Amino acid sequence: MFKFKATLHLNQLTDLMKKLFLQPLFLSVALVVLLLFGISGYYFEIGFPAWATLLMGLLIGILLLFLLRIIFSKLIPLLGKIPASVYATLLTGFTALYLMRMYAFRWPASLFYPLAIFALICCGLLIWGIWKILAKTNTKWGAIMIVGALVLAATGVFGFSALEGDPFSKDTDEEMSEVAVTTLKEKGFDDPSSPGAFEVETFTYGSGTDQQRPEYAEGVKIKTPTVDASLLLPDWKDKKKKWREKFWGFGVKDFPLNGRVYMPKGEGPFPLVLVVHGNHSMIDFSDAGYVYLGELLASRGTIVVSVDENFINSHWSGDFRGKEMPVRGWLLLKHLELWNQWNTGANPDLKKKVDMDNIVLIGHSRGGEAVSIAAAFNKLNRFPDNANEKFDFGFGIKGVITVAPTDYRYDREMELEDINYLSLQGAWDSDETSFWGMRPYHRLKFSEDFTGFKAGLYMNHANHGQFNTTWGRSDFGAPTEWLLNLKPLVTGEEQQHVAKVYVSAFVEAVLKGNQSYLPIFKNAELAGDWLPKEDYFSQYEDTSKKILLDFEEDMDVASSKMGIQIKAENFKVWREEQLKARDGGSQQNSALVLGWKYGKSANTDSLPRYTIMLPDTLKHFENADTLALSLALGNLSELKIKSDKKKKEKLPDQGFNFSVVLTDSLGRKATADVATSNVLPKTIKSKFTKFKFMDKEMMGQESEIQLKSCYVPISLFKQKNDSIELDKLREIQLVFDKDSLGVMVLDDFGFYIRP
């Protein structure tokens, strides 16, 4: 009897399982859910092989489906003629998909759920087709349903992958204004990205006990001490502490000083460059991604160290979300301490090998913010967030290079002084979508006797990750990377080549006194023979520039510093504003916006004019070499131009042009137009994802105002009127007589003065 009852209960349980789980609808939903859980598991990096995390994802999905199906089957009664199993299945699937979207895929709901429904249709056809064939109810229709499911799925995958391209390429392909420039190559200068004459030695130094990195364990040439960062990173706690220490084998009190060294063979002393990566998965090590810079600079006579800070990068157990930024900068200074000790005799092989008065720091992403922090900490005697941590650095850091940097992670803004600065940014960077590196540029101040410079380079079709050879073409990991629009991007080799040209030229200028490469920081067209064919905006400033207008001092649009008075006539738009980043944040820089529109019948007196009136006390222009100004094309929609089908007006989309009129105290005038000596900037637009609505939701606007430094040589004015006396200059007029409509953004107007 007992055996019979046990068999009966087993049969009932089997029937219940079949009723709950062996149904085409539930199996279709389950297949979609398990597919997504498997994908998420495959790409979830916790240090195990991908196949293992895939199985873990599938097991979690199966368990979740099982529990939800049981729960909803018990909770939902029969409603009318619709079986409870249908409700239970749909609620099970929806709940599982919701959890998946929230914690794994994180796609916009407006995209994720329609695609999930599409996948459900495909899986439903597939399951029902197989069901019919196995049940032998209708083999023909079963086969048709299977084929239909496969064709529909293939069409969807193909259509999804085809949603890529640059919708703005037609703007960039149009004929641009040609300005004759003599490139540095034509002048006989060598490409700064070409290898130098030095043989390169490579080795690593580190703790010697790193359980995850053999190159920093038994592979080290020099064993280094650990450092206690507990006062700088109190957020090393809870699960971040537990799982990180389990993985790495060390904690915040024992951070290692690990580095990859690229050293020129020779006596030295050689300048020193430290390169530091940014935030990435801590188990996808980032420090090997700058070998292209290390080998190049070392071959040209500079010691390069790629610093390992992977142990404070993001992990599934948590991201420090900027609280680790002081440590990122501080660790660089602790590395410099090591090199200073070795250089003074602690290591015989490195004694007097380094010129500790000539150092450059290079940082990528969060590392870009870290190098500014390091340069600021270098001059302090205590940690500003906890004065119990004493500093004693004071190294000869002559310059910092920020590559696609952040500038908002640390809750303090670094305001640097008297240091050379360069920032590189891609316009298609979907991780750091705005040129944050220009904010430290604008905050950086020079004293009158400082002889350095600051510069920025904005490159079209360059992204975030390709500046690091190990990060890859996508700025996000799967499955988010499937949404990115990658086809328009330049290749990794091209993007890294741009970095090689500018980083090497910066090192030559700052650490070796080679001023011959300075022109490419002022004007990227002068490096045209060395760079991929792309759109580049350069910004540049040094202490020889006397700025008359920077639009930062007050809210009065009719006056400026030094007693300058301003008058604007016949403009539709006239204002000064703080420029916004793509996501609506501040660029921390104010500029002038002018907009105009006039008809063909406009006479000379009705032309738009922006007049800068200089006081008698403002002199010293007799040695002016170049008139300099930063420009950008504004938004023409501000002019509210109505569509007229009968009278078609061509709207300028490649740039704009205007005349500059100089007048001295005796009324003598000289005129030159800006386009004669400059390729005027266009608006660079970016489509980061495959869907326009996603770009606006995830990335912000399709473009942001990025200025370009433009120059009008004084010789052009002298050609028109050689009698004008610049030491008696009293008025500068911008006359918009070349294009009948336009919106212009202008900043940092002034002159470069010859010493």
Image (cartoon, rainbow, N blue to C red):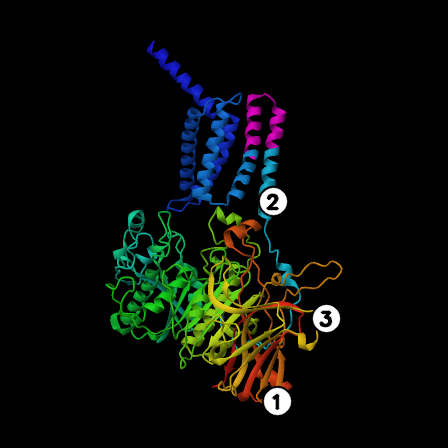
Residue 530 sits in quarter: bottom right
**Disc 2 or 1, which lies upstream in sequence?**
2
Task: Please give the name of the residue rendered at 52% of the width and 70% of the height, measured from the top-left corner.
Answer: 538
Q: Position of residue 282 (x, y in %)?
A: 37, 53
Across and down, in percent, residue 45 comes to 40, 47
Front-lying residue, 401 or 146: 401
CA separation in Å, label 2 and label 1: 64 Å
How crowded is the residue under tag 3: few (<14 C-alpha within 10 Å), some, or many (20+)?
A: few
Whether residue 309 appears in this view of the structure is yes
Q: What's the residue type where badge 2 is placed? A: Gly
Which residue has dot 1 on it? 722
Q: Secondary structure at mark 3?
A: loop
Q: Quadrant of residue 8?
A: top left
Q: Which residue is mark 3?
A: 600
- Count of numbered circles on the image: 3
Disc 3 residue type (three-letter): Lys
Which is in the foreground here, disc 3 or disc 2? Answer: 3
Q: Which residue is mark 2?
A: 159
* Numbered disc in front, either 1 or 3: 3
Spatial CA span between label 3 and label 2: 48 Å
Is 211 rendered above or below residue 16? Answer: below
Give the residues drawn in magenta, as a range.
Answer: 122-147
Residue 365 location in percent, x, y? Answer: 43, 60
Sort mark 2 into few (<14), some (14-19) or many (20+) by Cα contacts within 10 Å: few
Whether 543 is drawn above or below 33: the answer is below
Q: Quadrant of the N terminus?
A: top left
Looking at the picture, which amino acid does disc 1 mark? Asp
Majority SS type along the magenta span: helix
Dot 2: what SS? helix
